[in-house]
Image (spheres, helix red, strand yellow):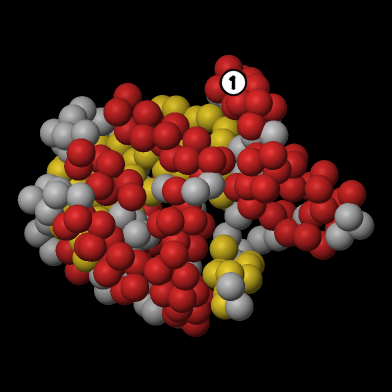
Amino acid sequence: MGVVTRALVETQQAFDGVAAGYGRSNAENPILCAMRARAHQAVRTWVPAGSHVLDLGCGPGADAVHLAQHGYRVTAIDSSTAMVDEARDRVQTSGVGDRVDVHAVGIHELDRLGSRAPFDAAVSNFGPLNCVDDLPEAAQRIVAKLKPGGVLVASVIGRICPWEIALYLARGDVSRATIRFRRGLVPVPLDGRTVWTRYLAPRELERIFAAAGMTRVSLRALGLFMPPPYLQTFANRHPALVDQLQRVEDRCGGWPLLRSWGDHFLVVLRRA
């Protein structure tokens, strides 16, 4: 079992505190919905239907249910027990209980899954890998749970978000504008609690997973031309503009250099 640190405990408690409304707030955010749709498309592109998928940091279970409804078998895990409760409720009310198992297990303690492996693929959406205390160790654990040739589809919080830099520099808040350039885990507030987050560039993540035996096969930006999810009010006020920005991002988000920027990046890694 992985070591439980103060950062892991505080992050778990923060997500416990918001679990009850987390799924609803995500579903009401058009930016998050667009990002989620592109992560799902990547899974459909790289993972054949019928595969057994490990959902890393499943939250309230939206991805697990969606994948089950599209022909996948899912083992979902999260370190937040309140999120696990929400996910189990969603699974049952969605009628996919025969295709989804949900476990209160953190990414740092994947060994607790025991014989539930190897998996055909793993999915990690909206930054669970950013909250892992020891990412090199976690990478080794993830790879050990994948079949040879298995893939990891991960939406990861990036370092260079042009919208965020411009927004906070315009407000004169240099510290907030440059927070993503800090090294190591950074305390980020969430409803009065703290989520410890490590911002990552694609090359940093790829280097860590390369040491564990995985190589990148796909990379694109999420939230480069599109505003970051916390600008939901802006997106609601300007839907036509946001639609245009999404089309530009879909066309250019995979270009070299640009694909390394954005609020998140979407990467697909394959085990040798």
In the displayed structure, 255 sits above or below 202; it is above
Left/right of residue 41 with respect to residue 257 in the rendered view:
left
Q: Nearer the viewer, residue 13 or 27?
A: 27
Secondary-structure class at tag 1: helix
Residue at (50% x, 79% y) in the render: 10
Q: Nearer the viewer, residue 37 or 199?
A: 37
Answer with the quarter of the image where residue 271 lies: top left
Left/right of residue 138 with respect to residue 73 in the rendered view:
right
Residue at (38% x, 53% y) in the render: 139
- Residue 256 visible somewhere in the drawing: no
Answer with the quarter of the image where residue 178 lies: bottom right
Amino acid type at image mark 1: Arg
Instruction: Measuring from the top left, give residue 142's x and y in whole percent.
Output: 30, 53
Residue at (22% x, 62% y) in the render: 88
Image quarter where the N terminus lies is bottom left
Residue at (58% x, 60% y) in the render: 198
Image quarter where the C terminus lies is top left
Instruction: Measuring from the top left, give residue 90's x and y in whole percent.
Output: 25, 57
Which residue of the protein is positioned furthest toward the bottom in this rendering? Answer: 6
Q: Nearer the viewer, residue 8 or 76?
A: 76
Pointer 1 residue: 247
Instruction: Measuring from the top left, give residue 216's x and y in whole percent.
Output: 43, 32
